[in-house]
Image: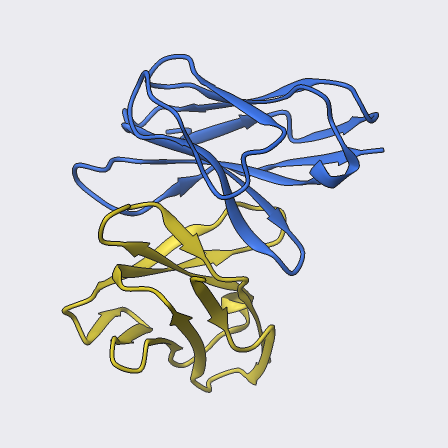
Chain colours: A yellow, B blue
Amino acid sequence: SQKIEQNSEALNIQEGKTATLTCNYTNYSPAYLQWYRQDPGRGPVFLLLIRENEKEKRKERLKVTFDTTLKQSLFHITASQPADSATYLCALAGRSQGNLIFGKGTKLSVKP
Amino acid sequence: NAGVTQTPKFQVLKTGQSMTLQCAQDMNHNSMYWYRQDPGMGLRLIYYSASEGTTDKGEVPNGYNVSRLNKREFSLRLESAAPSQTSVYFCASRETEKSEKLFFGSGTQLSVL
């Protein structure tokens, strides 16, 4: 069956360091992959989208990579800040059916 | 610019009661979705509507019904609530012609006792 795994439930890092979050998938051929941020008591907010034919996307301090051979996406936050503390979700959409399937999320805590 | 608005924000039901969760979007989006989010389970799709007048089942549709009232509104109904339906419910919308990203509401926290 299709499976999406975000390897860490929680990640704690020091302010200023780079946070790296992982999203792996099996039995799936996604057309694209998205990353969302979710704060407590709020709905997810879209951050970045990367397509199957793209290797890397950047937006300010955020960088996403997509390796369809490894079936993995990495999400990086450089120069992390306490305000980056949140849960980050990855989501995949298939080619034939565009509905997103979400991972369980990684809770990032950035300590000052 | 309100985006996606869900009501109510909180609700407590007794087993067997019914209720409707309301969702409205003001972005003229074609597609709308209902997800539930449970600890350790992530977001799971209940129902979706690709366009006005159409609805389809998602991953976990049992115990729910939906109505796409018009392009703006998409409601989720629990006919006979069960404790297993205790969850946080999110409505989302997407302009499928222009973008694949979802816009989410702020959620409804539902407890069924």
**Residue at the spot 43% in from the left edge and 77% down from the top edge:** A22
In the image: residue A58, left or right of residue B16: left
Pinpoint residue A54: horizontal percent, then vertical percent: 16, 70
B8 to A74, vertically: above or below = above
Give the quadrant of the C terminus of chain B: top right
Residue that sits furthest to the left in the current view: A53
Task: Name the quadrant containing residue B6.
Answer: top right
Residue that sits furthest to the top in the current view: B69
In the image: residue A28, left or right of residue B99: right
Pinpoint residue B61: horizontal percent, then vertical percent: 54, 34
Q: Give the camera-side residue of A32 and B25.
A: A32
Count every numbered label the image shows and give the total: 0
In the image: residue B83, left or right of residue B44: right
**Residue at the spot 17% in from the left edge and 36% down from the top edge:** B97
A96 to B83, vertically: above or below = below
Give the quadrant of the N terminus of chain B: top left
Residue that sits furthest to the front in the current view: A1
Pinpoint residue A40: horizontal percent, then vertical percent: 62, 53
**Residue at the spot 27% in from the left edge and 64% down from the top edge:** A29
Task: Name the quadrant containing residue A94.
Answer: bottom left
**Residue at the spot 22% in from the left edge and 53% down from the top edge:** A95
